[in-house]
Amino acid sequence: MHAAELTMGRIFAVRFDHGEDFFTSLAAFCEDHGVRQGFIPMFIAGLRRIELVGTCERVTDPEAPVWSSVYLESVEAIGGGTLAYDAEADAVVPHIHVSVGLKHQSATAHTSHLLSAEVQFLTEMYVVEVAGPTMSRVRLADLYGVPQLSF
């Protein structure tokens, strides 16, 4: 277990608009407001299309991460995550998980890591900036190269 006491920065309420790409809009928000790291305690969203980590195929190594995706349409979502800074790429790296319900299939649910999404009607989120310590992601070779939050 690793822990660090966080010093909070600014707190934002953010609304994405109909038709926007979720990650493009999140990156633009971070750039426009100078947010390099923080967390998203919660967001709600209507999403036209979405890709989540998942598979229906047989998994040969149940300990290994799944790198394939599941494509869904017309979902309602609730989620949260973290924002870390990649100094080499000079970019904010989000790590977001969601639970979604398929609107046209009795709200059948899926929960996983968010890979892509297009906003349908709205996305409303809160972003809490972390002023310190520096948050980054480190890929751990002994854990299949999964990027871990580091402070």
Image (cartoon, rainbow, N blue to C red):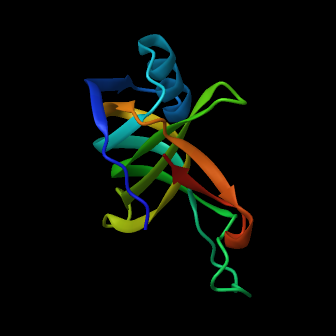
Q: Quadrant of the N terminus?
A: bottom left
Q: Position of residue 144 (x, y in %)?
A: 72, 69
Taking the image as shown, residue 91 lies to the left or right of residue 109, namely: right
Q: Position of residue 77 (x, y in %)?
A: 34, 50
Question: Where is 47 relative to 75, above or below?
Answer: above
Q: Residue at x 49, y 25 (%)?
A: 25
Q: Quadrant of residue 129?
A: top left
Taking the image as shown, residue 49 lies to the left or right of residue 14, namely: right
Q: Is residue 70 visible?
A: yes
Taking the image as shown, residue 130 lies to the left or right of residue 13, namely: right
Q: Residue at x 51, y 38 (%)?
A: 84
Q: Residue at x 31, y 41 (%)?
A: 6
Question: Where is 5 relative to 125, above or below?
Answer: below
Question: Where is 102 relative to 96, above or below?
Answer: below
Q: Quadrant of residue 139?
A: bottom right
Q: Position of residue 91 (x, y in %)?
A: 62, 27
Q: Residue at x 41, y 14 (%)?
A: 33
In front of the other: 86 or 4: 4
Taking the image as shown, residue 119 lies to the left or right of residue 11, namely: right
How many marks on residues? Answer: 0
In front of the other: 14 or 120: 14
Q: Is residue 125 visible?
A: no
Q: Residue furthest top?
A: 32
Q: Position of residue 31 (x, y in %)?
A: 51, 16
